[in-house]
Amino acid sequence: MTITLEVVKAEQEKLATMIAALEAEANKPTFFEYGGQLFPLKRGEIYVGTIITPSIKFHLTKLPGESNPGPWKDVNDWALAQGGELFDRVEGALLFQHLKAEFKEEAYWTRETRKNDTAYAWYQYFGNGYQNLSLKGSKLRGVAVRRLVFQ
Protein backbone atom coordinates (compact mmCIF):
# COMPACT_ATOMS: atom_id res chain seq x y z
CA MET A 1 0.00 0.00 0.00
CA THR A 2 1.30 3.42 -0.95
CA ILE A 3 1.33 5.99 1.79
CA THR A 4 -0.30 9.17 0.62
CA LEU A 5 -1.49 12.29 2.33
CA GLU A 6 -5.08 11.08 1.95
CA VAL A 7 -4.29 7.73 3.63
CA VAL A 8 -2.56 9.47 6.55
CA LYS A 9 -5.48 11.89 6.99
CA ALA A 10 -7.99 9.03 6.91
CA GLU A 11 -6.04 7.19 9.61
CA GLN A 12 -5.78 10.38 11.62
CA GLU A 13 -9.58 10.78 11.46
CA LYS A 14 -10.04 7.19 12.70
CA LEU A 15 -7.70 7.85 15.62
CA ALA A 16 -9.45 11.12 16.48
CA THR A 17 -12.79 9.27 16.57
CA MET A 18 -11.33 6.56 18.82
CA ILE A 19 -9.80 9.16 21.14
CA ALA A 20 -13.10 11.05 21.38
CA ALA A 21 -14.95 7.82 22.25
CA LEU A 22 -12.42 6.94 24.96
CA GLU A 23 -12.56 10.46 26.39
CA ALA A 24 -16.36 10.34 26.47
CA GLU A 25 -16.24 7.00 28.33
CA ALA A 26 -13.67 8.33 30.80
CA ASN A 27 -15.80 11.42 31.46
CA LYS A 28 -18.99 9.51 32.24
CA PRO A 29 -20.00 9.87 35.87
CA THR A 30 -19.20 6.99 38.19
CA PHE A 31 -22.06 7.95 40.50
CA PHE A 32 -25.23 9.98 40.54
CA GLU A 33 -26.74 12.04 43.32
CA TYR A 34 -30.35 11.87 44.46
CA GLY A 35 -31.73 13.56 47.55
CA GLY A 36 -28.25 14.28 48.84
CA GLN A 37 -27.29 10.61 48.61
CA LEU A 38 -24.61 9.30 46.23
CA PHE A 39 -25.28 6.10 44.27
CA PRO A 40 -22.29 4.38 42.64
CA LEU A 41 -22.37 3.25 39.01
CA LYS A 42 -20.30 0.34 37.74
CA ARG A 43 -18.16 0.78 34.62
CA GLY A 44 -20.41 0.95 31.57
CA GLU A 45 -23.60 1.12 33.64
CA ILE A 46 -26.22 3.67 32.55
CA TYR A 47 -28.69 5.41 34.83
CA VAL A 48 -32.23 4.94 33.48
CA GLY A 49 -34.53 6.63 35.98
CA THR A 50 -36.42 6.44 39.25
CA ILE A 51 -39.43 4.26 39.97
CA ILE A 52 -41.62 5.00 42.98
CA THR A 53 -44.49 2.73 44.01
CA PRO A 54 -46.41 2.56 47.30
CA SER A 55 -44.21 -0.34 48.41
CA ILE A 56 -40.74 0.47 47.03
CA LYS A 57 -38.61 3.31 45.67
CA PHE A 58 -35.57 2.57 43.52
CA HIS A 59 -33.27 3.84 40.82
CA LEU A 60 -32.95 1.66 37.73
CA THR A 61 -29.66 1.21 35.89
CA LYS A 62 -28.83 -0.77 32.76
CA LEU A 63 -25.72 -2.90 33.03
CA PRO A 64 -23.36 -3.02 30.03
CA GLY A 65 -23.81 -5.52 27.22
CA GLU A 66 -26.63 -7.80 26.21
CA SER A 67 -27.15 -11.51 25.80
CA ASN A 68 -27.31 -13.38 22.55
CA PRO A 69 -30.84 -14.41 21.58
CA GLY A 70 -31.88 -17.42 23.60
CA PRO A 71 -34.70 -19.09 25.50
CA TRP A 72 -35.98 -17.25 28.57
CA LYS A 73 -34.18 -19.43 31.14
CA ASP A 74 -30.78 -19.03 29.46
CA VAL A 75 -31.18 -15.27 29.10
CA ASN A 76 -32.43 -14.97 32.69
CA ASP A 77 -29.40 -16.96 33.91
CA TRP A 78 -27.13 -14.69 31.84
CA ALA A 79 -28.62 -11.56 33.48
CA LEU A 80 -28.08 -13.02 36.96
CA ALA A 81 -24.46 -13.84 36.07
CA GLN A 82 -23.95 -10.15 35.15
CA GLY A 83 -24.90 -9.13 38.68
CA GLY A 84 -28.38 -7.96 37.74
CA GLU A 85 -31.62 -9.40 36.46
CA LEU A 86 -34.04 -8.97 33.59
CA PHE A 87 -36.27 -5.90 33.69
CA ASP A 88 -40.04 -6.06 34.31
CA ARG A 89 -42.72 -4.55 32.04
CA VAL A 90 -42.82 -1.15 33.76
CA GLU A 91 -39.02 -0.95 33.62
CA GLY A 92 -39.13 -2.03 29.96
CA ALA A 93 -41.36 0.93 29.14
CA LEU A 94 -38.92 3.23 30.97
CA LEU A 95 -35.97 1.74 29.07
CA PHE A 96 -37.81 2.21 25.78
CA GLN A 97 -38.63 5.82 26.65
CA HIS A 98 -35.16 6.86 27.84
CA LEU A 99 -32.64 4.46 26.28
CA LYS A 100 -34.20 3.17 23.04
CA ALA A 101 -30.98 3.95 21.13
CA GLU A 102 -29.08 1.50 23.36
CA PHE A 103 -31.14 -1.43 22.02
CA LYS A 104 -31.46 -3.25 18.74
CA GLU A 105 -34.94 -3.02 17.21
CA GLU A 106 -35.72 -6.52 18.47
CA ALA A 107 -37.59 -8.26 21.27
CA TYR A 108 -36.01 -8.52 24.74
CA TRP A 109 -37.18 -10.83 27.52
CA THR A 110 -38.61 -9.37 30.71
CA ARG A 111 -38.45 -11.23 34.01
CA GLU A 112 -42.25 -11.48 34.14
CA THR A 113 -44.02 -14.72 33.30
CA ARG A 114 -47.67 -15.14 32.44
CA LYS A 115 -49.67 -15.48 35.65
CA ASN A 116 -51.91 -18.37 34.55
CA ASP A 117 -49.41 -20.16 32.27
CA THR A 118 -45.71 -20.02 33.19
CA ALA A 119 -44.74 -21.52 29.82
CA TYR A 120 -44.97 -17.90 28.59
CA ALA A 121 -43.01 -14.78 29.50
CA TRP A 122 -43.45 -11.14 28.56
CA TYR A 123 -41.11 -9.34 26.20
CA GLN A 124 -40.45 -5.72 25.21
CA TYR A 125 -40.01 -4.93 21.52
CA PHE A 126 -37.64 -1.99 21.05
CA GLY A 127 -38.77 -1.18 17.53
CA ASN A 128 -42.06 0.38 18.61
CA GLY A 129 -42.35 -0.17 22.39
CA TYR A 130 -44.88 -3.02 22.06
CA GLN A 131 -45.07 -5.62 24.85
CA ASN A 132 -46.47 -9.11 24.43
CA LEU A 133 -46.12 -12.74 25.52
CA SER A 134 -44.00 -15.44 23.92
CA LEU A 135 -43.26 -19.06 24.71
CA LYS A 136 -40.19 -19.25 26.95
CA GLY A 137 -38.47 -21.46 24.37
CA SER A 138 -38.41 -18.60 21.84
CA LYS A 139 -35.02 -17.02 21.23
CA LEU A 140 -35.06 -13.38 22.31
CA ARG A 141 -32.37 -11.01 23.58
CA GLY A 142 -31.84 -9.82 27.14
CA VAL A 143 -30.19 -7.06 29.14
CA ALA A 144 -29.42 -6.95 32.81
CA VAL A 145 -30.64 -4.15 35.05
CA ARG A 146 -29.86 -3.22 38.63
CA ARG A 147 -32.18 -1.66 41.19
CA LEU A 148 -30.79 0.70 43.80
CA VAL A 149 -33.38 0.92 46.58
CA PHE A 150 -33.63 4.13 48.57
CA GLN A 151 -35.81 5.53 51.37
Image: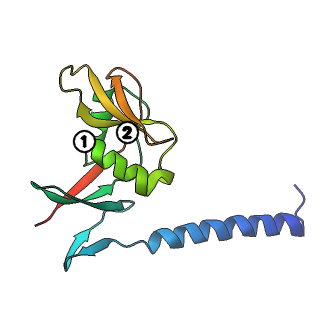
Amino acid found under the numbered disc labelled 2: Gly
Judge by depth and name the residue closer to the eye, 46 or 88: 88
Q: Quadrant of the C terminus?
A: bottom left
> How many residues crowd mark 1 within 10 Å: few (<14), some (14–19), many (20+)?
some
List the residue tagged with mark 2: 142
| Residue 106 seen anywhere in this rendered image of the structure | yes
At which x and y percent is residue 127? 51, 41
Q: Secondary structure at mark 2?
A: loop
Residue 65 position within the rendered picture, expressed as x and y whole percent measured from the top left: 41, 48
Residue 55 percent location from the top left of the image: 9, 54
Locate residue 118: give its quadrant. top left
Relative placement, left or right, of 42 versus 11 is left
Q: Position of residue 10 (x, y in %)?
A: 79, 64
Q: Residue at x 37, y 39 (%)?
A: 142
Image vertical order of residue 130 relative to residue 59, above or below: above
User: Of tags 2 and 1, which is closer to the observer?
Assistant: 2
- The Cα atoms of the two marked residues, 2 and 1, are separated by 11 Å
Residue for point 39% across, 22% down? 138
Q: Looking at the picture, does residue 151 appear above or below residue 138? A: below
Q: Is residue 104 above or below residue 114?
A: below
Q: Secondary structure at mark 1?
A: helix
Q: Which quadrant is home to the N terminus?
A: bottom right
Residue under label 1 = 80
Task: Decide if residue 144 is in sight here.
Answer: no
- Tell which of 62 and 132 is nearer to you: 132
Q: How many marks?
A: 2
Q: Residue visible at 87% across and 63% down?
A: 3
